[in-house]
Image (cartoon, grey):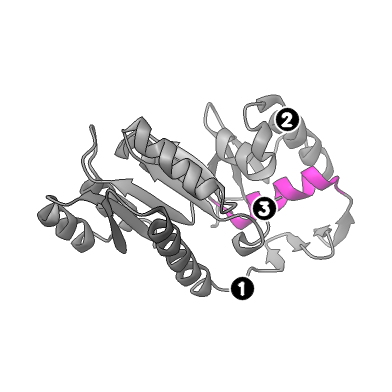
Amino acid sequence: MKQPERDLPAKVLIVDDEPQITRVLRTALSTQGYSLRIAANGVEGMEAVHEWRPDLVITDLAMPEMDGVELCRSIRAISKVPILVLSVRNQDRTKIEALDAGADDYVTKPFSIQELQARVRAQLRRHFASQPEAQQVIALGDFVIDIPQHRVVVRGQEVHLTPKQFDLLVVLAQHAGQVLTHRALLHAVWNSNADQPEYLRVNIGQLRKKIETSDEPQYIITEPWIGYRFRPTGKDDI
């Protein structure tokens, strides 16, 4: 299960349509221990922001489908994640537009690997310093979930869960009322096995057997073809 982000490798999303640049960035940042994901354009980048929730976004400016400026605006509409833009020397006007659209910093191509790494570190330090401490006990509706103690109480009765069932319940509870996609849940709980949807289906079924009061799910609601939604009181009151 994902603990607070500062206890895991920081997640860096790279949005660029030039394979040569993404290879350089992957090499430069993987040596720093970051978890990386690549998106080829702004549309894919926004999908990754929604699903993966990166700690930092590095984006090119000139891209097909959605350029870097529009990507900055779209990200800022939903997130405070730091954005580092890549620009070439003759893109000053676009660079200013990107900063006005919500970018936090920029690196000019061709760039120094050391400078890039330093700017990434600086943005991540600010990002993590601004985050509140992770919630250790979730008391919500019929549920009390003590994360450090790995303990779950439902309707006043303790329920014993396997580690993966516990991790899955925590992720659902942290996003109560929201629809979480199959892929988002798989990445959150299994990470490297995110292409194995049967893991999710089986564990959802087992979890339901332990927390639900009837064969008709009240807490973990299936959203057909999309994912699942957690209702901590068994009704829509979030």
Q: Residue at x 15, y 57 (%)?
A: 97
Residue 228 in the image: state x and y as whole percent.
59, 39
Q: Residue at x 82, y 58 (%)?
A: 152
Left or right: residue 215 compared with residue 37: right
Q: CA distance from mark 2 to mark 1?
A: 30 Å
Q: CA distance from mark 2 to mark 3?
A: 17 Å
Residue 7, image quadrant: bottom right
Range of the magenta residues?
Answer: 161-177
Q: Overall secondary structure of the magenta stretch?
A: helix
- Which sits in the foreground, 5 or 26? 26
Of the two numbered discs 2 and 3 on the same chain, state the one appearing first in sequence.
3
Asked if the magenta segment contains residue 102, the reply would be no
Q: Which residue is mark 1?
A: 133
Res 53 seen here: no
- Which sits in the foreground, 107 or 124? 107
Q: Which residue is mark 3?
A: 2
How many labels sit on residues? Answer: 3
Res 21 seen here: yes
**Which quadrant would the C terminus be assigned to in this image?**
bottom right
Q: CA distance from mark 3 to mark 1?
A: 14 Å
- Which sits in the foreground, 117 or 103? 117
Local crowd size for mark 1, using a 10 Å CA cut-off: few (<14), some (14–19), many (≥20): few
Asked if the magenta segment contains residue 176, the reply would be yes
- For label 3, the SS is loop
Q: Which residue is mark 2?
A: 199
Residue 62, image quadrant: top left
Residue 29 in the image: state x and y as whole percent.
50, 49
Of the two numbered discs 2 and 1 on the same chain, state the one appearing first in sequence.
1
